[in-house]
Image (cartoon, rainbow, N blue to C red):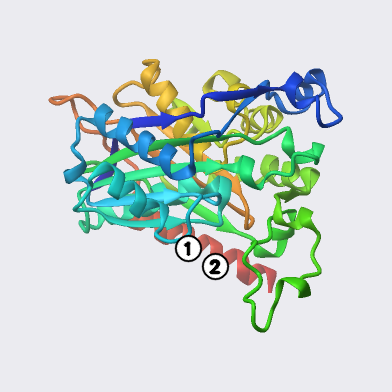
Amino acid sequence: MIGSICGTGSCIPRYTMDNNELAKFVETSDEWIRERTGVIRRHIIKEETTVSMASEAGKRALENAGVSAEQIDLILVATISSNVLLPCTACEVQKNLGAVNATCFDLGGAACSGFVLAYNTAEAYLAGGVYKTALVIGSESLSSITNWNDRGTCILFGDGAGAAVLKAEEGVRYLPVTHSDGAKGEALICRSRYDTNGITKKTSDASVNEEEYFIQMDGQAVFKFAVKKVPEVIKEVLVLNCLEKKDIDLYILHQANRRIVEAVAKRLGEPIEKFPMNLQEYGNTSSASIPILLDELNRAGTLKPGQKLLLAGFGAGLTWGASILSLPRKPGTKKLRFGRCFTVTEQAKRVIKRKISKRKRRL
């Protein structure tokens, strides 16, 4: 069994802030931001919240899939910027949608890798026969944890939510590849505001700067990390699944920076046309960026039955990963096959053996 995407949805805040408006309160310019990031404007919450956007994106995904809320067995929400801690965002979405049969939980901390990890988690549950239908959402209100006086970060981020409905179906399952490197986590950090307890650690004892409660990023380190690791993990997931670059119709990358996407395309030797982008309109929406882009491509008619998509995310942790999926074919069409390729089990064994050999050579 595989988890096949059968519907998408998104929700974007109504209020927009373009680069010229941003330049009124931080030293920057439209030209400077466009040249370095590709971002033209971003959407910022007013009356919306992380929960409300996640709920609306989920509702639209269900409508697009032709699936009722009662059919959902699993709701996963990837977020680092929810307006609630308890109950979790996913349970709030369940309540708002009336998905009374769903098991719900959030995935946090991975930030921009969040949707890929949530997708992998849902896909594993569906492939294992635990659940039949899942709603996977990425929703972020990054404006609430952005330091709007820091030119290095505030030009990048925006708010929004995207969602996808996955249904368990017969088909070929592609194995994902994911990695983490906690030793390099300092490149992207944000301290919790709940670091006091009023007894042994009081507010007056806190010696941190206010800036530590907002996103702090070593831009150069993150850029170098992304342009190196993303092409590597894409190649790795292709080899693992006995596929080639020509087999991929579209690369759906996390929308962080136009220069990163262009660098990845160049290192892979793939045409930039295979790397759709919408970051110029939304900026970096973290875990929401991939599902928002998926929804836009879906509703524009760009996504076609039988296409292979490669999703790749990179973010806090540091974490990064890639997954391959095939869009469901119309009923009656021939199912996809590996052909002369190895079975999934044989692929996994070969990759593990190769990694063990590399480690032995290092010792």
The amino acid type, in three-letter code, at marker 1 is: Ile
Please name the residue shown 62% across and 66% down the image: 194
Q: Is residue 248 left or right of residue 151?
A: left
Q: Is residue 248 visible?
A: no
The residue identified by callout 1 is: 352
Q: Is residue 144 left or right of residue 31?
A: left
Q: Is residue 267 left or right of residue 159?
A: right
Q: Nearer the viewer, residue 203 or 223?
A: 203
Q: Is residue 298 left or right of residue 2?
A: right
Look at the numbered discs 2 and 1 and tell me whether their residues touch, using CB distance below 8 Å.
yes
- The answer to whether residue 86 is above or below residue 9 is below
Please tell me how crowded label 2 is: few (under 14), some (14-19), or many (20+) other residues with Cα within 10 Å: few
Q: Nearer the viewer, residue 50 or 182?
A: 50
Residue 25 location, quadrant: top right
Residue 346 location, quadrant: bottom left
Please name the residue shown 69% across and 69% down the image: 362
Please name the residue shown 72% across and 46% down the image: 222
**Residue 77, position as x, y percentages in the image:** 41, 49
- The answer to whether residue 38 is above or below residue 268 is above
Q: Is residue 299 visible?
A: yes
